Amino acid sequence: STVTLFSSRRTMAAAAPAPAVELLELKRVTVEPNECPLVSPIGVKLDYELSSEVTGGYWAVFYVIDTVRRRHLIQLGTTSVGDLAKGANSMEFSAKELNFAGVKASRLTTAGMLTCALRRAKGDAPADGDEELAAVNMVVQVETASGKPAGKSTEPAELVRTVFDPLA
């Protein structure tokens, strides 16, 4: 018996999705402080352009640690909900600390991801299940201040973070 994957080029072309229009074009990213203790306060500023207005938009900021055993998602916070105009915009977010309670230091020294997700709120405030429209992902390298591997007695305060600019 013969199996036909595609009956013709025409079928393949018809099955191809239309090119997506990018909602967000990132112009500049600033993360401060950088190259500092992992648990230090953090400030993020994004300058970006939107191809269309976003009603009920807000930014959710979180830190992701993926390990072989588990994925840790540390919520850092959100900006307030508001309408975002088409064209040039900026977002500023700050957190007083990064709390890694319950995460072993040895797991923190894997590459992490600082994510700023643009979402549309279903109501007046951010909530689980809100639609994610775009995300800005920044790789975070975490090392011990000494450069030696993290051990069981290593505390998160002994680790140093470096956030990489996704535009670099």
Image (cartoon, helix red, strand yellow):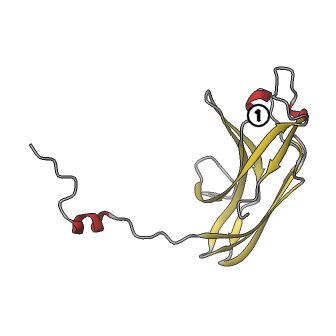
- As drawn, the residue found furthest toward the front would be 147
> What x and y, as percent, mark residue 16?
34, 65
Task: Answer above or below: position of 136 versus 155.
Answer: below
- As drawn, the residue found furthest toward the left would be 1
Q: Residues within 10 Å of mark 1 (few under 14, many from 20)?
A: many
Q: Secondary structure at mark 1?
A: helix
Task: Answer above or below: position of 22 versus 69.
Answer: below
Residue at the disc numbered 1: 108
Q: Is residue 164 left or right of residue 135?
A: right
- As drawn, the residue found furthest toward the top would be 152
Location of residue 105 by image quarter: top right
> What x and y, as percent, mark residue 106?
76, 28
Task: Answer above or below: position of 4 versus 15.
Answer: above
- Residue lying at 77% horizontally and 35% vertically, measured from the top left: 109
Looking at the rendered image, the quarter that the C terminus falls into is bottom right
> What x and y, as percent, mark residue 13?
29, 68
Identified by mark 1, the residue type is Leu
Q: Nearer the viewer, residue 127 or 18?
A: 18
Q: Is residue 102 visible?
A: no
Q: Is residue 27 left or right of residue 145?
A: left
> What x and y, as percent, mark residue 127?
65, 49
Q: Is residue 127 left or right of residue 61?
A: left
